[in-house]
Every structure is written in structure tokens, then in C-alpha cells.
């Protein structure tokens, strides 16, 4: 239950902030490009730190790192509530992301420590319930607080919830893993972090500005640094990531499937919100409420899919879940300027069924494939791959939208600070269809990769 609460809190903070962006922008006098870093900065730091803090959990105790994540997350939330300008809100969101990284990277490892292999899928299923319920609460509670109280309360509510969860964690969680007396791989941490940051900075910059020499430099530099990181990891005695983990037959398909699923699914989420707020002129809360049934259905499906993966393996529930998500995107691709709004809800429900089937099974497969002493690294890698897809999906959504309207206008529509100009709705909607088809292709590729593990599971 403590783990579910942690996941729920991080999920709440992912969706609740989206609804508050227009009010933050007006109250703090933040520029349009700057306000998006309230979201991207949070995701970036989790992406950069997930593997590193996962390894810290292996070295110094996964429960201790998980509890430290709660404390930092609550502190970051309080500071965000007190922010007075653009620099402080972005900086404090980064601090909050550090706590989120510690929570998300170590939660999977704590579950693996406390549940036997044959029961982990069910545990990850309930973990997915926490994520789905958190997303729903973020939408509902966020809408009420932003509309009737103040955007600052979306952060203040983390204080009592976080303190209560931290107290429960201290009481019920016990360290189950043996700590590893190793030195930190500082060269590896720096090169991997800088490499991922360079690539993600380039991709997110493309969402708001044209391709420039500076953007190319960040992209090329990031790729080079990751290559250097791989070289370092083959030579240091205590590498941050043991690259031989990719030799485990089921590990690579599971991690790549997680990245591609996030890339396709989050891009669709951004595009649907832009469609509802821009083309259909809905408010952020009205647009988000149409997606709530999908999260609810996903929370119901998750535990059943997790239990099924315990009994028959991850291959079938994870792969079928991805295939169902392809169907959801096909439904989204039918949206027109005058489409009934219930079509969006139907697509969200189908998508919820797919995600509810995929996540518990895939998470369980990664932790099942990892050796016990590397649960933290494996959990962190899973979070890193998924978050890389999430951050890239934001850039993909804006870049595709820019084929029909300007990037600046696409940005304004996404954060809810501008509506679609009259006469552009049809053009923009037609441009979205190509994006939905692209997401279908990416999700189909994820399903193919997921299916590769089938023959290995059948051989066991």
C-alpha cells in the first residue's frame, strides 16, 4: 500500500500541473516557452536520475532511498507552492523531480524484494492502480483547486499526504536487500546524464524553435557522450550499469517496448488535449474529464493483467495490451471537427484497457529477468526508458502540430492560454491524423518487440 501511495502521488503531480499551467503563466508572468518547462523539467530530471538513484538503492538500501524520495518530493512541493517567478517554479519542480526519481526508480525494486516471483505481477497490477487513480485525482482535484481556490494548492496538498505516507513507510517497510559496498561510478553517471540531457534538450528545443546549429550541437554531443559512457562502462570495475543485463533475452524487448509505448501513448495524449482545447474550444478541465473513464478502466484491468502474467508470463498480456492500444489510436484517428465527443471517451477507455494490460506484465517481466542484486538498476532503467519516450513524445506532438499551425500557437493551445483561430480547425485536425497514424506505427513496433520475448518464456 505504501508503494501504491508513492506512485499515486507522482501520478497526481503529472496530470494536476497540466491543468494549472494557464494560471501559473498569468500569476508568475512566465513566458509561453518557459511555462512548459514546469512539466518538461520535472520529466527530464526523473529521466536523468532514474538509473542512478536506482543503483544508489542497490548500494545504500532501496527502502532508505524510497523514503528519502518522499521527503525530497514533499519539500519540493512546498517550495513550488511558495514560488514567486519563472526561475523558482522551474527550479523547485526540478527538486520535486529528484524526489520523484527516487520514488519511481526504487518502488519497483522494493516490490521485487518483498514479493516472490510468482506474485509480482499482481503487485505491479495494484501499482498500476495507483498510477491510474493518481491521474484521475490529478484531473478532478486539480480542476477544482485551480478553478475555485488557487494553483498553489495543487502543491500544498502534497504536504499532508506525503508526510502521512512517509510515516507509514517508516513503520511498515523493512530493508530486504543486502547492501553492496561499491564506489559510485562518477564518470559513468556524468557522461550518461549529460548525454541524455543533450539529446532531450535538443528534442524539446525543436518543439519551440527551428533547427539551429546549437540544437544540432546538443544532439550530436549527447550521442557522443552516450557512446563515451558505453566505453566507460566496459572498463570500470564497478560500472553504474552492467551492460551484460542486455544479454538477458527478455530484458531488451521489455525495455524497448516500454520506451516506444510511452513515445506513442503520451504523444496521443498531448494531441488529443490540443484537439479538445483548440478545435473543440473546451476548457482544460472539460477536456481532461473526457479522458477520466480511460484511467478508471485501466485501474480495474491492471490487477487482473498482473495476476494473469504471474500465471502465464508477460508475453500475452503485455503484447495484447499494446495491440489494444493500437486500436485506440485508430479510433482517435477518426476524429473530425464535428465528431461526437463520446468518441474521445470510447478511445480513452480502449486505451485504458491496453495500458492496464501492458504495464503490470511488462514491469514484472523486467524485474523477473533481473538478478536480485540488480533490482534497483533494472527498476531505474525501466523508468529511464519509459521517461525518455514520454519526453520525446511531447516534442513529437508539437512538431506534428506545427505542420498545420505555428509551433507558438500549438504551444499556446496545449497550455490552454489560446484557442484555435477560426477557420484553422479543419486544417489542424487533418494534420493530426498523420500523427495518430505515426503513433499507431510506433505502438505496433512496440507490440512486435514485446512478442519477441514469447519464445523465451515458452522455453522456460
Image (spheres, rainbow, N blue to C red):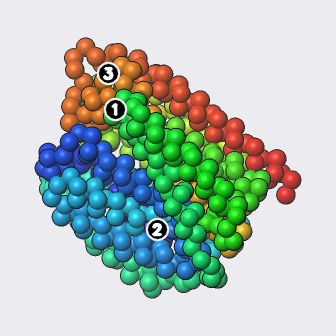
Q: In front: 345, or 155?
A: 155
User: Element at badge 2?
Assistant: helix
* Label 1 vs 3, first from the N-terminus: 1
Quarter occupied by residue 165: bottom left
Q: Is residue 126 visible?
A: no
* Label 2 vs 3, first from the N-terminus: 2
The location of residue 371, given as percent across then percent down, is 72, 68
Distance between the alpha carbons at the discs numbered 2 and 1? 32 Å
Distance between the alpha carbons at the discs numbered 1 and 3? 14 Å
The location of residue 186, given as percent across then percent down, is 54, 68
Distance between the alpha carbons at the discs numbered 2 and 3? 39 Å
User: Pointer 2: residues within 10 angstroms few (<14), some, or many (20+)?
Assistant: many
User: Element at badge 1?
Assistant: loop
| Left or right of residue 428: residue 53 | right
User: Element at badge 3?
Assistant: loop
Point out which mark residue 88 bears: none
Residue at 46%, 40% in the rendered image: 217
Q: Is residue 324 above or below residue 224?
A: above
The location of residue 175, given as percent across then percent down, is 57, 83
Point out which mark residue 102 bears: 2
Point out which mark residue 209 bears: 1
Task: Specify the farthest residue to the right.
Answer: 459
Q: Is residue 352 above or below residue 360?
A: above
Q: In front: 410, or 163?
A: 410
Q: Quadrant of the C terminus?
A: bottom right
According to the image, label 3 marks what residue? 405
| Left or right of residue 67: residue 73 | left
Amino acid at each position: 500500500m505504501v508503494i501504491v501511495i508513492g506512485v499515486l502521488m507522482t501520478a497526481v503531480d503529472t496530470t494536476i500541473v497540466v491543468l494549472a499551467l494557464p494560471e501559473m503563466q498569468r500569476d508568475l508572468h512566465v513566458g509561453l516557452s518557459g511555462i512548459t518547462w514546469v512539466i518538461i523539467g520535472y520529466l527530464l530530471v526523473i529521466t536523468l536520475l532514474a538509473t542512478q538513484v536506482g543503483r544508489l538503492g542497490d548500494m545504500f538500501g532501496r527502502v532508505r532511498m524510497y523514503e528519502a524520495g518522499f521527503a525530497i518530493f514533499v519539500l519540493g512541493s512546498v517550495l513550488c507552492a511558495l514560488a514567486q517567478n519563472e526561475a523558482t517554479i522551474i527550479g523547485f519542480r526540478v527538486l520535486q523531480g529528484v524526489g520523484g526519481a527516487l520514488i519511481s526508480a526504487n518502488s519497483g525494486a522494493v516490490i521485487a524484494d518483498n514479493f516472490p516471483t510468482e506474485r509480482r505481477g499482481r503487485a505491479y497490477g495494484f501499482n498500476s492502480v495507483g498510477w491510474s487513480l493518481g491521474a484521475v485525482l490529478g484531473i478532478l482535484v486539480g480542476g477544482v483547486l485551480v478553478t475555485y481556490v488557487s494553483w498553489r494548492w495543487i502543491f500544498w496538498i502534497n504536504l499532508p499526504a506525503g508526510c502521512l505516507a512517509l510515516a507509514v513507510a517508516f513503520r511498515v517497510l523493512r530493508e530486504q536487500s543486502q547492501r553492496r559496498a561499491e564506489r559510485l561510478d562518477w564518470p559513468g553517471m556524468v557522461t550518461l546524464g549529460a548525454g541524455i540531457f543533450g539529446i532531450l534538450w535538443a528534442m524539446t528545443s525543436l518543439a519551440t524553435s527551428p533547427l539551429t546549429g546549437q540544437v544540432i550541437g546538443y544532439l550530436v554531443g549527447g550521442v557522443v557522450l552516450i557512446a563515451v559512457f558505453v566505453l566507460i562502462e566496459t572498463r570500470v570495475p564497478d560500472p553504474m550499469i552492467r551492460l551484460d543485463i542486455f544479454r538477458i533475452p527478455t530484458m531488451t524487448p521489455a525495455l524497448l517496448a516500454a520506451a516506444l509505448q510511452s513515445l506513442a501513448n503520451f504523444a496521443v495524449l498531448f494531441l488529443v488535449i490540443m484537439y479538445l482545447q483548440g478545435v473543440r474550444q473546451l476548457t482544460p478541465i472539460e477536456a481532461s474529464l473526457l479522458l477520466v473513464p480511460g484511467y478508471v478502466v485501466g485501474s480495474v484491468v491492471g490487477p487482473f493483467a498482473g495476476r494473469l502474467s504471474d500465471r502465464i508470463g508477460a508475453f500475452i498480456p503485455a503484447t495484447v495490451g499494446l495491440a489494444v492500444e493500437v486500436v485506440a489510436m485508430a479510433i482517435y484517428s477518426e476524429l473530425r471537427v464535428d465528431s461526437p465527443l463520446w468518441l474521445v471517451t470510447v478511445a480513452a477507455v480502449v486505451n485504458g484497457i491496453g495500458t492496464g494490460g501492458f504495464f503490470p506484465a511488462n514491469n514484472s517481466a523486467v524485474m523477473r529477468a533481473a538478478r536480485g542484486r540488480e533490482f534497483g538498476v533494472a527498476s531505474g532503467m525501466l523508468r529511464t526508458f519509459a521517461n525518455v519516450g514520454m519526453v520525446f513524445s511531447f516534442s513529437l506532438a508539437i512538431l506534428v502540430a506545427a505542420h498545420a499551425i505555428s509551433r507558438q500557437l500549438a504551444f499556446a493551445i496545449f497550455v490552454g492560454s489560446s484557442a484555435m483561430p477560426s477557420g484553422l480547425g479543419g486544417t489542424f485536425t487533418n494534420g493530426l491524423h498523420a500523427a495518430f497514424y505515426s503513433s499507431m506505427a510506433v505502438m505496433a513496433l512496440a507490440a512486435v518487440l514485446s512478442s519477441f520475448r514469447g519464445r523465451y518464456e515458452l522455453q522456460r
